[in-house]
Amino acid sequence: MGHIMKEIRVGLLGFGTIGTGMVKWIQDNGELIAARTGITLTTTRIADLDITTDRGVSLPEGVLTTDANDVLHGDDVDVVVELVGGTGIALTFVLAALNAGKPVVTANKALLAYHGDEIFAAASANHVDVYYEASVGGGIPIIKAFREGLVANNVTAAYGILNGTCNYILTRMEREGAPFDQILSEAQALGFAEAEPSLDVDGDDTAHKACVLGSLACGKWLGMDSIAKQGIRDVTTDDISIALEAGYRIKLLGIIKQDKDGLQIRVQPTLVPIKSMIGGVMEVYNAVFVTGDAVGDTMFYGAGAGRDATASAVIADLVDVGLNLANGTARRTPPFCPYNDSVSLPPAADIVTRHYVRVHAEDQPNVMAQLTAAFGKAGIGLAEVIQHQTSGPSVPIVFMTHPAREGLVTETLEQISDLAAVTAPPVHFRIEDM
Amino acid sequence: MGHIMKEIRVGLLGFGTIGTGMVKWIQDNGELIAARTGITLTTTRIADLDITTDRGVSLPEGVLTTDANDVLHGDDVDVVVELVGGTGIALTFVLAALNAGKPVVTANKALLAYHGDEIFAAASANHVDVYYEASVGGGIPIIKAFREGLVANNVTAAYGILNGTCNYILTRMEREGAPFDQILSEAQALGFAEAEPSLDVDGDDTAHKACVLGSLACGKWLGMDSIAKQGIRDVTTDDISIALEAGYRIKLLGIIKQDKDGLQIRVQPTLVPIKSMIGGVMEVYNAVFVTGDAVGDTMFYGAGAGRDATASAVIADLVDVGLNLANGTARRTPPFCPYNDSVSLPPAADIVTRHYVRVHAEDQPNVMAQLTAAFGKAGIGLAEVIQHQTSGPSVPIVFMTHPAREGLVTETLEQISDLAAVTAPPVHFRIEDM
């Protein structure tokens, strides 16, 4: 059928879980991939500090090395896959590969979020490719959707469940009615959460991924400073059950919105309608709900992490690089095309959303009047007020507001904090009715 | 950033709803698309029998013509967009364009389902591209996902809600408890169903799209003969409410499954769990739930039809064609790469699924015993039997089976039909627990 047949020699940096998956699936499905695309992938070099552990895949003699230079500068490597992770040595490796004229495939969202500009500049200067499908949404081809499938659209909104660990914890908290700390410990024991969980549960990982998607959406590579961020440590089983009662489910979302006032990008625990498409995404799954001005509402769903799903995305990128090498069309679709010199980011205080506020107060006669007066004085309309009978001395009272300016709500919560009857700082999430 | 900048001159055949959308969105977002990709799209020729109706888009003098040859053979046309529809003149046009050496973008699933082999052969002989993203799932980039994003995977299963009209009718039947005929009439009045609804409600359109997806999944272009097909005319509000009661929702699905026994491909009203991702797809929306051996479960969701969503897909294809023209890489990703000479299609009778059977019988003492005996004698296990109190002389009785061979169930239903107390042929749907 007129395929150009070509062998592409893959060098891998970092022989961890995902790297093992890449090697396995290239071995298992390599013939299929070649039949479909003309590209035969061969893993010729793998560099890792540990080259003795049995990963369950067999490799020819001489592939494994402890010297990254064998990958970066090897004559038998056409493309470098960076699966080291982090923003330290990974940056050095990626820049070295690009400067050696080798295209790079990476799954490293933190690296892109912090050093995207530098990496894309080096790729441009050396006229080579950088592909990064596996950096967001694991196996979901969401980067390709943003860059190619939805290329005709202004992305007006994107809501992403981008961290499987958080979604798993929130799912189990709902199902079992058990608190965050307990579920986190169990998730750690089961391997669904890291021993150091902060990157996940404090929202950093979601923010890195939102940075990548937001940058693609707006045409300027955004820094991490642009992103307001709140993790899921404050979510209680009370919040989850009160939200459910009101028809909502709490998800950690990366939210991107673009309109005439500019771009907002934030990571926050968010109440979404249970019946919305994104509200039905449970367990470790990820999803990105994308609205384009032409295409309307779309959603892309799948495993957001894991050896095999992520390998699927890495290999798809390798095929794209391979087709570019086979055809002599490096940078056919450059890794990032900046087309906006400046993007207006409205101050966080100016963002208008609906708000979910949980206040703990002593069970005294005049408390509700004081609280509602605080909202009333600020002109913040209340859509729902929920106070259940409880036995303790301090009762949780939940307010779900009509749309209101973030700054106004923040000020009001400061005033509420100062009330004598209020026993703890209010907890504050956002509501998106999609 | 090293883009090759190129103007691509687009010739359009068929200036209907989608064609109008294409022209509008090229005008509205053309600058954005050029900034992202280097490709400037310009609609230079539009052929339609009606060139006088105002479609609400302004065009330069000389673009509109009633002569298709101006598009097919115009020196000012680099790529031909076929939006005529059907399998008659559209085939002539597409082959003429390809034989004139022009790449083709089409949204025509019926044409591909019936004449894919011929079209792809002509494209190969003339070394030009055929792109068809808009043929399945409207604006959802599902063809790109099958061909590129999930290229590393054997697709083991795909379940598609592929016809917006059917999904809209089933959604309204559930919400309003109103019968098929009434909702169909109202849908026709609102423009959500055609005056001649058969292509939609009898499952043909879904089968055309399943043919495209199934062919991409198995590596052989399948004929329509391969596809078992049942529409939604037999679905009653009773079925919908009984299914809901059991935790299921009825959807018209295109189903593709591949395993060691071969490929099954069928279009059937199917009970899916309400809580499954596909069970939450309502209104006119489409979705394709795809399982790959590497990526696991994924889902792609969006508007399956409509001017703007479909135009989004057509323009994405035009950019791919444009990049190929700009880089001299026609057929970089050929329209279809057959890699299986023969695909084993097990006989329909051998397919094992769970079954939903509705029997109408006279309300007599021994009827239930006779019916359950028929299933029992055949060795078909019953997971659920539902008979509600009703006032009429003929009562609906529903059986939901454990997994059983299609042929065995068909034979059993013939025997049940022959029972004296049974007043109408049993109605038979399938159950997929996803």
Image (cartoon, coloured by chain):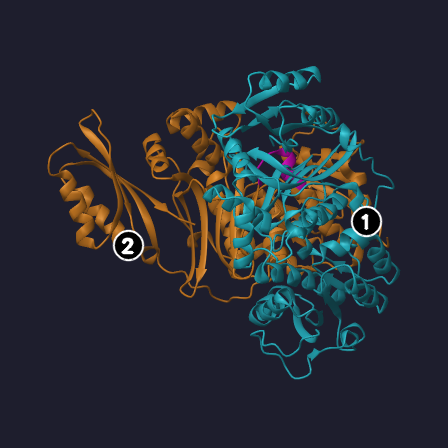
Chain colours: A cyan, B orange
Q: Are the numbered discs 2 and 1 placed on the same chain, yes or no? A: no
Specify the subunit that label 1 lies on.
A
Specify the subunit that label 2 lies on.
B
Q: Residues within 10 Å of mark 1 (few under 14, many from 20)?
A: many
Amino acid beneath label 1: Cys
Amino acid beneath label 2: Gly
| Tag 2 secondary structure | helix
Magenta stretch, residue numbers: B302-312
Q: Position of residue A274 (x, y in %)?
A: 52, 35
- Residue B307 is covered by the magenta coloring: yes
- Residue A366 is covered by the magenta coloring: no
For residue B399, above or below residue A420: below
| Tag 1 secondary structure | loop
Residue at x 67%, y 18% (from the top left corner): A374
Mark carried by residue B407: 2
Q: Position of residue B193 (x, y in %)?
A: 49, 30
Mark carried by residue A337: 1
Q: Looking at the image, which is closer to me, A108 or B149? A: A108
Q: Looking at the image, which is closer to me, B350 or A167? A: A167
Q: Quadrant of residue A1?
A: bottom right
Q: Looking at the image, which is closer to me, A418 or B267? A: A418
Total marks drawn?
Answer: 2
Q: Quadrant of residue A217?
A: top right
Q: Position of A350 compared to B243: left or right?
A: right
Q: Looking at the image, which is closer to me, A434 or A177? A: A177
